[in-house]
Image: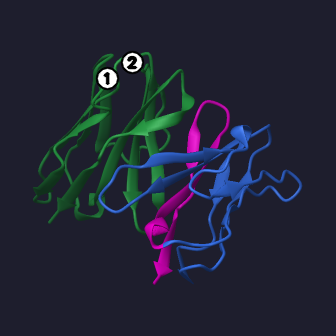
């Protein structure tokens, strides 16, 4: 298994642009988590899905952020419009029935200028 | 609410010295605690969990419910231990991570 796959690895965009981050969980994992990593705040849970259904999105910072999971093998995190303070590394992780260990992807490093 | 506190953002030790990375938690129920590690340019990976009571790469961690702590310890630090370490708590329905501690082992 290739593990959790995230794309792109790096994204540089200008303020105001739409950004879409993608994640493919490990086959058979039915829980998917989106985290944001910054120096100041560490790893913050943004949202997680169980069986493709969003369970807790209380960590989503603003309405500019949205996440979808149209099927068991794909999820997106969208920021529209993006702002410089959104610059961070965004991690996707998957698990079985929300039971750790969480398996993390390599992350997407987002830079908004 | 569940919360994980890692009071040190950076911990520098000399090679061969003992290491203790602190983690305190807040949770009303019975917690499940973990340590994750992120080496340079690699993804986060599970290091150990309290229920298995194991030693991984020389690291151990004991859950102290009285002090609500789950400190990570190693008697002799090695250069390859340099990494980011995250303490995590699995509570009701979600996993919460601490802010992380960067361990720097000085040769």
Q: Is residue B42 left or right of residue B61?
A: left
The residue at which mark 1 appears reads as: A69
Do residues under tags 2 and 1 come within 8 Å of each other at their CB atoms?
A: yes
Residue topped by disc 2:
A52
Q: Chain B appears what colour? A: blue
* Magenta range: B79-107
Q: Residue at x 79, y 37 (%)?
A: B30
Q: Position of residue B53 (x, y in %)?
A: 73, 44
Q: Residues within 10 Å of mark 2 (few under 14, many from 20)?
A: some
Answer with left or right where residue B19 lies relative to residue A5.
right
Q: Secondary structure at mark 2?
A: loop
Where disc 1 sits, the SS reads strand
Image coordinates of residue B56 in percent, x first then y, are 59, 51
Q: Looking at the image, which is closer to me, A77 or A98?
A: A98
Q: Is residue B1 visible?
A: no
Q: Residue at x 80, y 55 (%)?
A: B68
Label 1 marks a residue whose chain is A
Q: Position of residue A106 (x, y in %)?
A: 29, 46
Image quadrant containing the C terminus of chain B: bottom left
Q: How many marks do you count on the picture?
A: 2
Residues tagged by mark 2 and mark 1 found on one chain of the structure: yes
Q: Colour of chain A?
A: green
Q: Position of residue A2 (x, y in %)?
A: 27, 30
From the viewer's perspective, tell me whether residue A92 is left or right of residue A74: right
């Amino acid at each position: 298994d290739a593990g959790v796959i995230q794309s792109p690895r790096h994204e540089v965009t200008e303020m105001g642009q739409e950004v879409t981050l993608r994640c493919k969980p490990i086959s058979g994992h039915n829980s998917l988590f989106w985290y944001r990593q910054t120096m100041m705040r560490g790893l913050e849970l943004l949202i997680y899905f169980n069986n493709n259904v969003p369970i807790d999105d209380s960590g989503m910072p603003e309405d500019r952020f949205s996440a979808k999971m149209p099927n068991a093998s794909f999820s997106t995190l969208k920021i529209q419009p993006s702002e410089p303070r959104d610059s961070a590394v965004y991690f996707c992780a998957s698990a079985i029935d929300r039971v750790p260990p969480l398996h993390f992807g390599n992350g997407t490093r987002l830079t908004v200028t | 609410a569940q919360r994980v506190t890692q009071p040190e953002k950076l911990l520098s030790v000399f090679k061969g010295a003992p290491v203790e990375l602190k983690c305190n938690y807040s949770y009303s129920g019975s917690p499940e605690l973990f340590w994750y590690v992120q080496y340079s340019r690699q993804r986060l990976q599970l290091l150990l969990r309290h229920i298995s009571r194991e030693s991984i790469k020389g690291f151990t961690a004991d859950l102290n419910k009285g002090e609500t702590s789950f400190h990570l310890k190693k008697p002799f630090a090695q250069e390859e231990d340099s990494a980011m370490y995250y303490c995590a708590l699995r509570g009701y329905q979600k996993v919460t991570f601490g802010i992380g501690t960067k361990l720097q082992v000085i040769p």
